[in-house]
Amino acid sequence: MSQAREVIQSLYDAFGRGDAGFVLGLMADDIHWMEAEGSPMASGNPYASPQQVGEGVFGRLLSVFDDFAAVPSEILAEGDRVVAFGRYSGVHKESGEKLDAPFVHSWTLDGETITAFQQYTDTEQHVRLMG
């Protein structure tokens, strides 16, 4: 397994445990984080620090959804690039409606540090549930 793939697998594992400190600690201070076009969270694009990602992305998601998860089904790596295919899930706190959306995440690393992220997902579900 490549080092880059191991780093991204550890990120998803930590996210699943709710270890935000570990996840944010993997990010470069000047990360270039892009949410999918059309997503409610794309209004902050590009997020340019771990703090901005934590507040503008993770904080917003966790304020709207219970049991939010991003679970990869396949992770591919080539050099410093990693692509993960998976699904988002969660339960909208107010309506009880379930989120079940596919995603593709593209990651760029410098050693063990994440320098860039691009999300691709079904933004219609996010818009419908998050407004």
Image (cartoon, rainbow, N blue to C red):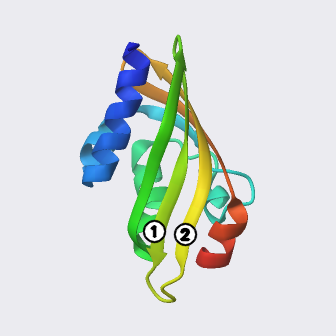
Residue visible at 44% across and 28% down in the picture: 114
x, y (%) of residue 85? 57, 39
Q: Quadrant of the C terminus?
A: bottom right
Q: Which residue is mark 1?
A: 90
Instruction: Indicate whether 80 appears above or below 119.
Output: above
x, y (%) of residue 110? 45, 17
Image quarter of residue 26 = top left
Query: Callout 1: 10 Å neighbours few (<14), some, many (20+)?
Result: many
Side (left or right) of 56 relative to 66: right
Under circle 2, the secondary element is strand
Instruction: Indicate whether 130 appears above or below 86.
Output: below
Q: In this figure, what is the number of numbered marks?
A: 2
Query: Callout 2: 10 Å neighbours few (<14), some, many (20+)?
Result: some
Under circle 1, the secondary element is strand
Question: Residue 99 bears which disc, if any?
Answer: 2
Residue visible at 31% across and 33% down in the picture: 10
Q: Could one spot residue 9 in this view of the protein? A: yes
Q: Amino acid at mark 1?
A: Gly
Image quarter of residue 69 = bottom left
x, y (%) of residue 42? 66, 56
* Mark 2 or 1, nearer chain start: 1
Q: Could one spot residue 34 in this view of the protein? A: no
Q: Amino acid at mark 2?
A: Leu
User: Is residue 126 or residue 44 the one in the foreground?
Assistant: 126
Side (left or right) of 93 relative to 80: left
Mark 2 touching mark 1, by CB under 8 A? Answer: yes
Residue visible at 35% across and 38% down in the picture: 11
Q: Quadrant of the N terminus?
A: top left
Q: CA distance from mark 2 to mark 1?
A: 5 Å
Side (left or right) of 17 relative to 131: left
